[in-house]
Amino acid sequence: KGIIQESKQESGDWSDEIEEIINSLSAGEGTDEIAIAEDGTINQSRLQESKNLSRKTARLFERRLRQLNKDKVLRNKERGEFDSRALIPAERGSTRTFKKTKKGKEKNYSCMIVLDRSGSMRDDIEDVELAAGAVAWGLEENGVDTCILDTESSMTTLSKPFGTKTDSFKQKVFAGRCGGGTPLQHTVDFARQRMKRGEGEYPFMIIITDGGVHGLKEFKSHVDDANFPVLGFYIGTTKEHVEDQLTLYDRAVVCDQSEDVSKKLMNLINSVMF
């Protein structure tokens, strides 16, 4: 109940979200480990860099969504509209000289972004926040509902609920917060339950971490229970160190130090937009 009161003091417009979260959880495990992310001092240059980058991510996502929504021409059909490309096969007596147009379907996505803010992420958290912010803004520009959860101080913290804009929560998203362990198995279970709050018909989850996940067996069971893609994005580590963890996800990649974090993250997201 203290969590509800705190949310009303901080931001009354989403206290109902916090109350619904607590009521939706089964009594016991994880309930006392959920908190509202604290506001922090924003690095304005990093914030502006993330906003600038978000214009690029918005364009990339827009292009990808336009490709997905585009009508598709199915050729070599026995019925339909005559295909002018099939003149030679028609002269040879082929009956598969028609085409049909399959109308593109506009898909609505929702995205849960889970950030590992454990103590070991301290050297990489600025890059993570920059990329996560740019991706969240870019997705929002294309109508994708987003939520941001953290694992911080060995518990789950809510930085940005579904149905809100990242700009309204920048003091939480860009606060540079780090500390504690990595109980991602609880955060992922919580995130899986919260996904229904997203407005999109096609949900997916991204987990950004450096590894060191506690309770791998439990973590994997929560990923398997999800009826949507769960992606892993590893930073601040090497493939050799986390190779045994990559199979925990529907798809996972490791971002090397020489690679562009935001670009690799966008490519990973585009791979599940189908």
Image (cartoon, helix red, strand yellow):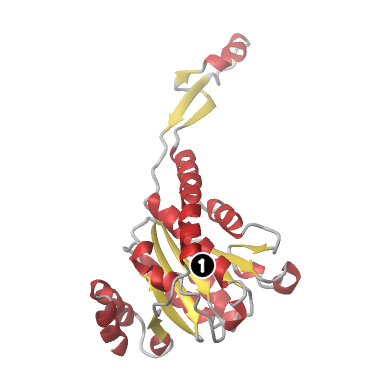
Q: Residue at x 53, y 79 (%)?
A: 184
Rendered location of residue 193, percent (x, y): 40, 73
Comparing 99 with 152, the one in front is: 152
Q: Residue furthest top?
A: 91
Comparing 50 with 211, the one in front is: 50
Horizontal side of 112 relative to 250 (left or right) equals: left
Disc 1 is placed on an element classified as: helix
Instruction: Determine whether 100 is above or below 35 in the image.
Output: above
Q: Residue at x 57, y 11 (%)?
A: 87
Instruction: Determine whether 199 is above or below 183 in the image.
Output: above
Instruction: Determine whether 65 is above or below 10 in the image.
Output: above
Horizontal side of 47 relative to 161 (left or right) equals: right
Rendered location of residue 156, percent (x, y): 45, 81
Q: Residues within 10 Å of mark 1 (few under 14, many from 20)?
A: many
Disc 1 target residue: 129
Comparing 199 with 12, the one in front is: 12
Residue 188 in view in this figure: yes
Residue 108 in view in this figure: no
Q: Residue at x 48, y 69 (%)?
A: 43
Q: Quadrant of the N terminus?
A: bottom left
Q: Residue at x 32, y 63 (%)?
A: 164
Comparing 159 with 198, the one in front is: 159
Rendered location of residue 218, percent (x, y): 56, 81
Q: Residue furthest right?
A: 240
Rendered location of residue 12, percent (x, y): 23, 75
Amino acid type of the residue that numbered disc 1 sits on in the rendered structure = Glu
Count the marks: how many?
A: 1
